[in-house]
Image (cartoon, rainbow, N blue to C red):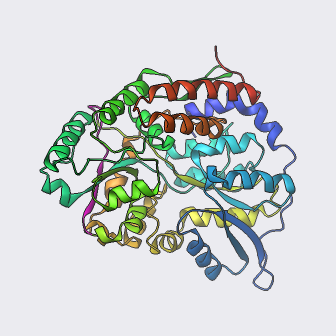
Amino acid sequence: MKPSSLVLAATAACLALLATACGGQDESDAGTGTPDQPMEITYWSWMPGTKEMTAEFNRTHKNIKVSFSEIPAGLNGGYEKLAKAVKAGNAPDVVNVEYQALPDLITQGLLRDSTAELGDAVEEYAPDSVRDLVTLGGKTWAAPYDVGPQTLYYRKDLFAKYGIEVPATWDEFEKAAEKVKTASKGKSRILDFWGDDVATWAGLAQQAGARWYGSEGDAWTVGMDDPATKKVADYWKDLVRGDLVLNHKAWSPEATKAVTDSRAIALIGASWSAGGIKTTYPDQAGQWAEAPLPHWGTPATGAVGGSSFALTKDTGKAEAAAEFAVWATTDQAAVKARLAAGTSSALPAAEDLRDTAKDSFDASFFGGQDVYGTAGAQVPLITRDWMWSPVHNSTSLTLQNELGKAQRSGDFWPAFQAGQKAAEKSIRDRGLELAE
């Protein structure tokens, strides 16, 4: 594998800590069982379609039985539950982990170095940009499932009603926002922005050229207060203060109602958002479409979310757990089962599975649009050299809180300055070196 900034940074800044955190993991492995005595492994997830996917694995595999348990979403309690389970000695064998959380969980000693079990498969199917996200210290820690290029979802019918062309740039987006407000006589806005959502901001900052985390020699760098992030913060401040967008709390009932009532006619999302929009707004079937995210002059986008299958540190069933993880990320049957429920629209990291995903997802809600083709075309436009740090989980809590405070005024920039300080402190507290 070609070295990437993420691999180099992880090697420089985290290798010693990774070795400490992951030392002593259980090397025992009882194989994969037999049809008469299948090996039972446990799997935790909160992600749509994973329960149905697990059922398909159990139907088609006789040597391994997967016991599925639903847990809260990552930072909503799932990762905390995992940490407690590892400490208590009753962790699952496999767990879904978002890319931004992976370094944090590794340095806490929660996950297994799975190079031997997953490395070859990941090398074969995952694009470089995605493979980088599960490789730290030159080791493979998880099998990537999907990739989440940031995109724009919009109401086709209302864009047509108000005479709005789908904006290609952020300048065009602002003009479109003004036109929506005027044409609707103040009843609608182009977007409900969700100004407290850290993931949305991270994608927008990445698109603009920000690099929140990096390395210099043996030390970590933090760049949340960089010019690119400030440009993005100032742009949205102007739209919020100009009353050109709504700005509800992310995922809140108020945000949902604004879209239901057609007061917000577009959403910033990612490839995986199509399933959620379809599920949340069933009465708007046929009225939605997906488009590339507006850009700053050169086509580009950021990545939001995306998940992997990781083996936990003390699993004694690594061979069976890895067989399930590889199947879940590379097999057509896994994709079909996960997407058939219609609740997920995850874009597989493995490019040769995207046609299967497209065929498995009922796109009638989007008027038959090939949303997988739209999202897939954005993957090469994801800006490179973005990395996550081992303190992003804790930093996100500070950043989310500060962004929430900033929503009323629209002055988001101080939140990123606070995030900068929180990240620097967390890096030092974790025992890592911070570049001066």
Examine the image and state in which quarter residue 331 appears. bottom right
Question: Considering the image in quadrants, where does the C terminus appear?
Answer: top right
- Residue 49 in percent (x, y) is at 53, 69
Horizontal side of 257 relative to 57 (left or right) equals left
Horizontal side of 310 relative to 387 (left or right) equals right
Magenta-tinted stretch: 286-298
- Residue 152 in percent (x, y) is at 32, 49
Question: Considering the image in quadrants, where does the N terminus appear?
Answer: top right
Between 176 and 337, which is closer to the camera in this rendering? Answer: 176
Number of numbered discs present? 0
Q: Is residue 320 visible?
A: yes
- Residue 2 in percent (x, y) is at 55, 36
Q: What is the chief secondary structure element of the magenta stretch?
A: loop
Between 327 and 116, which is closer to the camera in this rendering? Answer: 327
Between 313 and 154, which is closer to the camera in this rendering? Answer: 154
Horizontal side of 33 relative to 73 (left or right) equals right
Q: Is 24 placed above or below 384 here?
A: below
Residue 297 within the segment the image draws in magenta: yes
Residue 385 within the segment the image draws in magenta: no
- Residue 276 in percent (x, y) is at 43, 62
Q: Is residue 272 visible?
A: no
